[in-house]
Amino acid sequence: MLPDGEHPASSFVHTREKGNRGEDTAVEYLLTHGFEIVCRKYQSRRGEIDCIARDTDGTLVFIEVKSSWGAACGSPFSWVTPAKQRKLVMVARQYLAEHRITSTACRFDVIGITRGKVEHLRNAIVGM
């Protein structure tokens, strides 16, 4: 049950704002570590990839961002379930096909943000 006067739609907006704040924090982190941002919020009918970036060595990186700004319920990395991983791989393959990218090194990273602290897990998903 929602608090008095709070509408389910406003709860969604609040959750979306938190997600956007986490993604903004992740992008700032990536930029300070030499990444080039290629795309944010790539969407297809199969799903969304939070961020696509190019690492300093030229690797194309598909990034999932998970953030918790309050009391965390476990590690943000544990929230990227096997089903979510499969979905990310499918969406990444679609991105590569749409952009006719065939011979570029790729990887999947997860950025976890807990109460503002950023952790970056490289090669978090194996599947391309």
Image: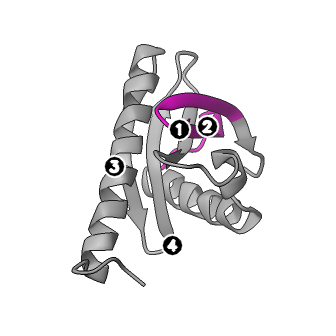
Q: Main secondary structure of the magenta part?
A: strand
Magenta residues (range): 100-122
Instruction: Identify the residue at image location x=42%, y=67%.
Output: 44
In three-dimensional space, the C-alpha distance between marks 1 and 4, rounded to whole angstroms, equals 25 Å
Report the residue at 43% width, 50% height from top: 99
Name the amino acid, label 3: Asn
* Marks 3 & 2, CB-CB < 8 Å contact: no
Q: Name the residue under label 3.
A: 20
Which amino acid, mark 4? Arg
Closest to the observer, 31 or 104: 31
**The disc label shown at residue 46, or none:** 4
Marks 2,1: beta carbons within 8 A:
no
Separation of residues labelled 1 and 3 (CA atoms): 12 Å
Quadrant assignment, res 38: top left
Left-right relation of 21 to 45 = left
Q: Position of residue 23 (x, y in %)?
A: 40, 42
Mark toward the start of the polypeptide (1 vs 3): 3
Answer whether residue 79 is magenta in the image. Answer: no
Q: How is the image coloured?
A: one colour
- Say which element carries label 4: loop
- Judged from the image, the secondary structure of the residue bearing numbered disc 2 is loop
Label for residue 113?
A: 1
